[in-house]
Image (cartoon, rainbow, N blue to C red):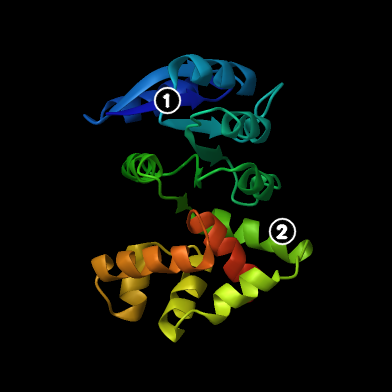
């Protein structure tokens, strides 16, 4: 059972998200919070597997809450919700440790899939949100470190191609279609790729791809 904490300052949104999540047999909503502070307090008490946070909330927002959650002894995976793909704070949330991003108009089945992915230690990126993250990286470009460059140099041509597609926000299924490979094959290749570049998840891989100019 996946235990999820939902945080949003809108009661209607909180209830809607909770109803969708509760419709799944393998997901249990442990609590609802109205801001970042109440979300962090609830996480300390209830130790959820996943925290679904609105990026913009009064008082402590989703970014500050993500930082505090990541400082816990056994932190939940954080899935950020945003109203607009061009949200200016998305990249800050990546740096704070968020494992994924979804737009609030994401279809219910995609929300459930994303929660399951994040709970399993993976990451998820809405392609439209990925675009905003990459734009911000371009505005605040950071040179690759020696270790990062060496990791990239160790990649095969196919791995570099996959990293570029991750940088464009593509899922394993999408990459498989692009490269004419099965989703299972891509999944294994992505796992090896993440290990080679020292990335914990696809969010970090996507950022590296953009900084290296591999997503174009």
Report the side of 112 relative to 153 (left or right). Answer: left
Indicate which disc residue 39 carries: none
Question: Residue 23 location in percent, x, y?
Answer: 26, 28
Q: Residues within 10 Å of mark 2 (few under 14, many from 20)?
A: some
Give 12 or 35, whichever is nearer the viewer: 35
| Numbered disc 1: secondary structure | loop
In the rendered view, would you say 148 is above or below 84?
Answer: below
In the rendered view, would you say 32 is above or below 213?
Answer: above
Q: Nearer the viewer, mark 2 or mark 1?
A: 1
Asked whether residue 168 appears in the rendered view, the answer is no
C-alpha gap between disc 2 and disc 1: 31 Å
| Numbered disc 2: secondary structure | helix
Asked whether residue 45 appears in the rendered view, the answer is yes
Question: Residue 180 location in percent, x, y?
Answer: 29, 80
Residue shown at 21% from the left, 29% from the top: 25
Q: Dividing the image into 4 quarters, which one contains the N terminus?
A: top left
In the rendered view, would you say 78 is above or below 192?
Answer: above
Residue shown at 72% from the left, 21% from the top: 59
Q: Which residue is mark 1?
A: 48
Question: Residue 139 location in percent, x, y?
Answer: 78, 63
Give 88 or 44, whichever is nearer the viewer: 44
Q: Residues within 10 Å of mark 1 (few under 14, many from 20)?
A: many
Q: Which residue is mark 2?
A: 136
Residue shown at 70% from the left, 70% from the top: 144
Q: Earlier in the sequence, mark 2 or mark 1?
A: 1
Q: Place residue 118 in its image quadrant.
A: top left
Residue shown at 56% from the left, 57% from the top: 204
Report the side of 36 relative to 115 (left or right). Answer: right
Q: Place residue 216 in its image quadrant.
A: bottom right
Question: Residue 79 location in percent, x, y?
Answer: 49, 39
Report the side of 108 relative to 143 (left or right). Answer: left
Give 179 or 20, whichever is nearer the viewer: 179
């Amino acid at each position: 059972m996946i235990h999820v904490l939902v945080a949003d300052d809108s009661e209607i949104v909180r209830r809607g998200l909770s109803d969708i999540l509760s419709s799944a047999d393998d997901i249990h909503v442990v609590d609802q919070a109205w801001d970042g502070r109440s979300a962090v307090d609830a996480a300390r008490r209830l130790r959820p597997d996943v925290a679904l946070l609105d990026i913009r909330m009064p008082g402590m927002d989703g970014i500050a809450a993500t930082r505090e959650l990541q400082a816990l002894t056994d932190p939940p995976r954080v899935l950020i919700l945003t109203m607009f793909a061009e949200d200016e704070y998305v990249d800050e949330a990546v740096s704070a440790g968020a494992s994924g991003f979804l737009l609030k108009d994401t279809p219910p089945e995609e929300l459930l899939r994303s929660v399951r992915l994040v709970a399993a230690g993976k990451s998820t990126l809405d392609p439209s949100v990925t675009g905003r993250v990459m734009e911000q990286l371009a505005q605040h470009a950071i040179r690759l470190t020696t270790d990062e460059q060496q990791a990239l140099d160790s990649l095969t041509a196919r791995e570099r191609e996959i990293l570029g597609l991750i940088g464009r926000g593509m899922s394993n299924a999408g990459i498989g279609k692009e490269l004419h490979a099965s989703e299972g094959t891509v999944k294994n290749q992505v796992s090896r790729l993440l290990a080679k570049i020292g990335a914990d998840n696809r969010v970090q891989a996507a950022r590296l791809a953009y900084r290296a100019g591999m997503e174009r």
